[in-house]
Amino acid sequence: MSRYDTMFARLDQERCGAFVPFVTLGDPNLEQSLALLRMLVASGADALEVGIPFSDPVADGPVIQAASQRALAQGVRPKDCWNLLAQIRKENADIPMGLLVYANLVVRDGIDLFYQRAADAGADSVLVADVPSAEAAPFAKSARAHGICPVLIGTPNANKDRLRQIAQLCDGYVYVVTRAGVTGVDQEVHLPPEHLLAVLKEVGAPPAMLGFGISSPKQVRAALKCGAAGAISGSAVVRHIEENLDAPGVMLHEIGDFVRKMKAATSLES
Amino acid sequence: MKVNTRFGEFGGSFVPEILYPALEQLEEGFLAAREDAAFQKELDELLHTYAGRPTPLYRCRNLCAETKARIYLKREDLLHGGAHKTNQVLGQGLLTKRLGKKRIIAETGAGQHGVATALAGALFGLETRIYMGERDVERQALNVFRMELMGAEVVPVAHGSRTLKDAVNETLREWTSSYDTTHYMLGSVVGPHPFPLMVREFQRVIGREAKEQILEAEGRLPDAVIACVGGGSNAIGIFSDFVEHEKTALVGVEAAGRGLHTQEHGATIHTGEVGILHGSRSFLLQDADGQIAETHSIAAGLDYPGVGPEHAHLQTTGRATYVGATDTEALAAFQELALKEGIIPALESAHAIAHAIKRAQEATEPEVLVICLSGRGDKDMSEVRRILRGEEEI
């Protein structure tokens, strides 16, 4: 049983959905990044989703691109990211930790070595943003061999056969996007994803968490209401980093507040 | 996908899931168009009456006249638009119409592909947006003006190194939300399948003509075909019909910039390692962690950290060889061709000329060389003038 399974079982009992914040590791620097990760956990994040900074993040909008650039400008390297993750794992035995990375970082030293490092650092899942299901088989195979859940993206423009393929290659959770485009902050949750979620369920995909554009408690409620098991918020979290670069204390405080508010919106009782 | 997405171990379609259906639709449209006689007829007609094909194969009268080599230039510089880029934007433009899309987007480095895309946009009545690195917008102001004259919107990209690779990133990002209405008119044999295959097929007219022309002129195939390689579309275009003739050497010339021993070059095949960028698996200039490197070349069109996957395959199988020419060598060849033949080549094409001159000088037996003169040098006038006047270092 993966940490995601355990988390979803617990949330079921609590009559809650999951709230999962995303940050880029090493943003704005290693020390503050560790403090931020601790704050996310302390403020009620059910799981963490983290990125390893990459020079050419084609699936990301301006906010997360800038996060990558800040980390790279600080000289943050993948090995620093593994150390950060390992530290958080040491402090938190149960929280699921997912990586969101780009393919070139995965293949650089060989796919197997990457998943080995991810497992050693205590990561639970890896989503490779620029590897679609049609190319994902070797990545999923290596992930599973190392006890890592391969996570794929379920998209509104995928047909049923494609969603079935995604379901087969995906463990832990499926990352569902409800709109086209790159990561970013939106006012609304776009397409009503009920249909997509129903098909994913039918083809046997793991629980769905919605991402891309989730920035308010209202959107979290909307996502859960249409049947998602959780909501992932990236750019809206990272924006608090960007806006408070010269005030690390305020940054931590604001992000803590944001996570508490978003988590509060995950109750299915109300 | 309906056909093999790989060239040996290279290629593939490494894009976010949301874009994959758009690539499938493009592949399907391209494969159907290729079999459609009416599509081919319209394309051939445009290549002839609009773009000026066939382009001549000219035997140099003076360049390397003292050597044992006979040098032929395939004059893509005479094509409408000033470079080989026009061949494939006409193909992709017709395909855009066929797919029912109303809008095109493209990346550009020096602006040559941007200009080609803009002319296709005007010709086919498509709304056109060009992404161009902020630094390139400054360096190539005249090309920006050309694009705008033809009705294109030029969007400066302020992220990353603010050059070609960032323009590609931004075009891909836009495409993930606009693919329903918009075709990405990618400019070279790079990117995810089907682009490397499709762009090659639209560019192979260069080699098809060159082969016929050299047989007519010499009664035999050339000893070598030489072309510059950035992404590699003119090179693939002229190589493709010669690949089966193993006695003809295929030579790609990469940008050695300030020297292959420095970090400042664009010689991806020479010094790069296998990785995944912009949709395909190929050689890449990158650091130990897999972060993409910044590149340098006097020729903006060769200033790119990747290379088409088919070139990676041709190199790995040994069918083609790849050499470098430095900024200095390219500039000398640029001047030599102007002085000896009255032809001013693009700085990119001057890399191929530089290697041909070197090879001719070393020839001990008579040999026939065909060089792809991929573009004309008008776009490089102000940069070369600054360098020759000593106002700018290379």
Image (spheres, rainbow, N blue to C red):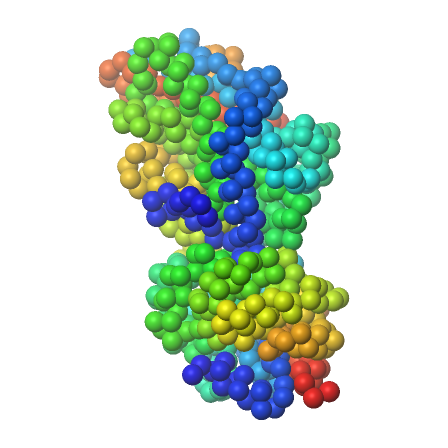
Front in this rendered view, residue A88 or B80: B80
Direction front: furthest residue: A202
Q: Is residue A171 visible?
A: yes
As drawn, is A35 to the left or to the right of A139? right
Figure disc tally = 0
Q: Position of residue B225 (x, y in %)?
A: 36, 24
Residue B293 vs A100, above or below: the answer is above
As drawn, is B12 to the left or to the right of B16? left
Front in this rendered view, residue A151 or B152: A151
Residue B145 vs A257, above or below: the answer is above
Q: Residue at x 39, y 16 (%)?
A: B212
Q: Position of residue A97 (x, y in %)?
A: 50, 77
Q: Residue at x 53, y 52 (%)?
A: B20
* Quarter where residue A220 is shown: bottom right
* Quarter where residue B18 is shown: bottom right
Q: Position of residue A55 (x, y in %)?
A: 52, 56
Q: Residue at x 55, y 22 (%)?
A: B41
Front in this rendered view, residue A90 or B178: B178
Front in this rendered view, residue A60 or B23: B23
Q: Position of residue B141 (x, y in %)?
A: 68, 34
Q: Is residue A52 visible?
A: no
Residue A113 vs B282, above or below: the answer is below
Direction left: furthest residue: B364
